[in-house]
Amino acid sequence: MTTSFDGPRYESEPDPAEQGIGKKQITNGYYARCWICATAFARLTYTARYCAVCERGFCEGVHGNFSRNRGTCVVCGARKADKAK
Ligand SMILES: [Zn+2]
Ligand SMILES: [Zn+2]
């Protein structure tokens, strides 16, 4: 099986849903994968943003937002909104 994807890659891809993995990859100079795309849609989406709460990668504008120098994925954003109510 071959893929046409030619972006940055790990030799063995860690699970993008693993807590802290996005931050680790991005601070090491790699792209992370959006954990929501991977978990919910089995889609490979590379991103340079990670969530400040769960520290997993998310694709900006679709599965999270970046504001005030801080990224939050939609899952953590929803949790925070629930608590605030
Ligand atoms: Zn996504
Ligand atoms: Zn999050």
Image (spheres, rainbow, N blue to C red):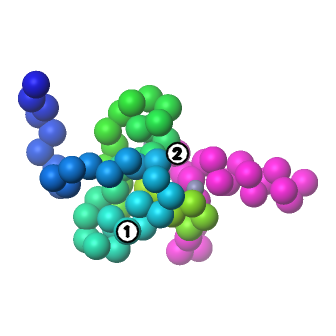
Q: Quadrant of the C terminus?
A: bottom right
Q: Position of residue 58 (x, y in %)?
A: 46, 52
Q: Nearer the viewer, mark 2 or mark 1?
A: 1
Q: Which mark sits nearer the N-terminus, 2 or 1?
A: 1
Quadrant position of the N terminus in the picture: top left
- Residue identified by numbered label 1: 24
Residue 37 within the magenta-colored segment of the rendering? no
Secondary structure under the numbered disc 2 in the rendered image: loop
- Label 1 residue SS: helix
* Spatial CA span between label 2 and label 1: 19 Å
Percent x, y of residue 55: 51, 63
Q: Which mark is residue 63?
A: 2
Mark 2 Cα within 10 Å, few/some/many (few <14, many 20+)?
some
Q: Residue at x 86, y 59 (%)?
A: 84
**Within 10 angstroms of label 1, few (less than 14), some, or many (20 or more) residues?**
some
Visible residue check, residue 70: yes
